[in-house]
Amino acid sequence: MWMLIAGVFGAGTLAQFTDWLFMGVLFHDAYNRYPEVWRLGIREGKERRAIIWSSLIGYVMTGAIFVLCAWSGVHSIALGLAVAVVAWIAGPLSIVVINGFFMRIDPKITLSHCIGHLARFGIAGAAAGFVFSSA
């Protein structure tokens, strides 16, 4: 049980750095292309609640990938990555791309968010595959 908790916490923490890279640093200037889509305070970095909540939800997402891997009988890193990619296609990829069709948001932001979610899911799937192969 401790390996499972450590896996979720470790993968979730590592994924926070990929979120920072892909959803914060990469194409940072592109966020200001359509400033009206962002809540007040977000662009200025004054709204910390959104960052805290998104970080917490990131751990939940990581845990959910572990659950999907457990349900799928994953016992290797490769299978964990496969489950993660399928979950990414069904979830964040579809939602972010569709939102990009309807919202005024720079396409670079859509791309970086898609890649960021793939990185998060991939880290979680690889960690789950490692944990479940050790069990």
Image (cartoon, grey):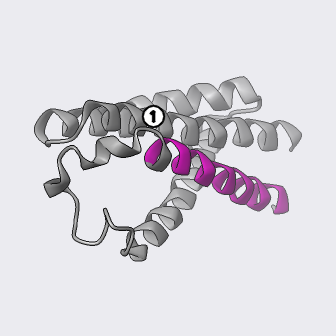
Badge 1 element = helix
Q: Is residue 109 left or right of residue 2?
A: left
Q: Which residue is denoted by mark 1 in the rendering?
A: 88
Residue nearer the viewer, 67 or 91:
91
Q: Is 121 positioned to the left or the right of 80 in the image?
A: left
Please state, as top left, top right, bottom left or bottom right, where the C terminus lies in the image: top right
Quadrant of residue 102 within the rendered picture: top left
Q: Is residue 104 left or right of residue 126?
A: left
Q: Residue at x 76, y 32 (%)?
A: 75
Quadrant containing the N terminus in the rendered view: bottom right
Assign the magenta stretch its main secondary structure. helix
Magenta residues (range): 2-23
Determine the residue located farthest toward the right in the rendered image: 134
Residue 33 falls inside the magenta stretch:
no
Amino acid type at mark 1: Trp
Q: Position of residue 34 (x, y in %)?
A: 17, 47
Q: Where residue 56 appears, x then y in whole percent?
A: 52, 67
Where does residue 81 sit, x and y in percent of width and height? Answer: 63, 29
Q: Residue 26's spot in the image, x, y percent?
A: 47, 39
Look at the picture and state if 73 lies above or below 42.
above
Q: Residue at x 29, y 72 (%)?
A: 41
